[in-house]
Image (tube, rainbow, N blue to C red):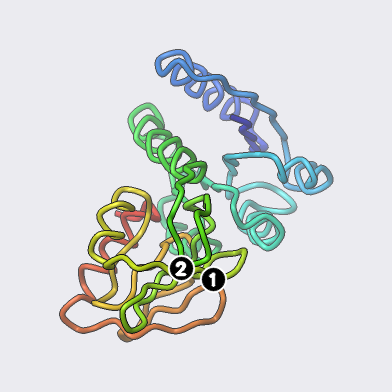
Amino acid sequence: MTIIVCDDSRTDRENLIRLLRDYEKKKGLAFDITEYDSGEALLQNIDQLQDSSILFLDINMAGTDGLDAAAQIKSLYPKISIVLVTAYIGYALEGYKVEASRFLVKDDLEVSLTECMDMLVRKLEQDTQVREFSFVEGNIRLKLSDILYIETARHKNIFYTKNGSFQIYKKLDEIENELRGYGFVRIHMSFLVNMRYIRKISSYVMTLTTGKEISVPKTRYAEVKKQYMLFKGVE
């Protein structure tokens, strides 16, 4: 797992990396950690982020701050998990705007980093899951993270994916059970959506990153928003 730490404070970088190494050892994982001391230095090497899993980014840096850097990085590499780190809790809302996976306060890292990493590692494991489905078009193996959403149409369900659409004769309830725990949320009787591709949920409408809008029933709205917030890591 490749991790990048960007903070203009050497002391804060060293503390965060120490905690990451402790977590790495405890969990039996292997981390490749690269550090940068400014937003400018990070953006000058932005190509490195293409193969990186997690970016820990200090918000309050001189020059290019963490929020500006995060916005540029997310526009190029939307899959990277960005964790914003700062001494000031008041930036949490701004972090949500740049689609941060987590927002951590420096004084609380000893406690919060483990829970944060547990969530991110679990998400990365989910993103690599592959399943074989018996579609009308034949048996096809799909990465679960490539499924955008599944929609019921008459007696079939249609998988809309990054690589096209596929039809299957299987009840949506059965599909929902098979995909439980892999980042999917049931909107109503006809839609199962991959939460990775939700752009926003507002006024009983879910907007996907593709621009598609799906109405969310009032009876399901609170639960759908709750599941999405938990998936995004917003308590």
Residue at (63%, 33%) from the top-left corner? 9
Residue at (50%, 46%) from the top-left corner? 127
The residue furthest left is 219
Number of marks in picture: 2
Q: Amino acid at mark 1?
A: Ser
Provide residue 155's location: percent of width, then percent of height: 31, 79
Q: Earlier in the sequence, mark 1 or mark 2?
A: 2
Q: Is disc 1 placed on a helix, strand or loop?
A: strand
Q: Is residue 85 left or right of residue 39?
A: left
Give the label on residue 165, or none. 1
Q: Nearer the viewer, residue 53 or 69?
A: 53
Depicted 9 relative to depicted 156: above or below: above
Q: Nearer the viewer, residue 75 or 175?
A: 175
Depicted 46 relative to depicted 76: above or below: above
Q: Is disc 2 placed on a helix, strand or loop?
A: strand
Give the label on residue 48, or none. none
Provide residue 58's location: percent of width, then percent of height: 58, 44
What residue sits right under mark 2 in the picture?
159
Q: Amino acid at mark 2?
A: Phe
Provide residue 178's location: percent of width, then percent of height: 30, 51
Q: State the image quarter where residue 162 is shown.
A: bottom right
Q: Nearer the viewer, residue 161 or 80?
A: 161
10 Å crowding of disc 2: few (<14), some (14-19), many (20+)? some
Q: Is residue 184 left or right of residue 200?
A: left
Are the residues flagged by discs 1 and 2 in contact, CB closer than 8 Å?
yes
Residue at (47%, 57%) from the top-left corner? 91
10 Å crowding of disc 1: few (<14), some (14-19), many (20+)? some
Q: Name the quadrant of the N terminus.
A: top right
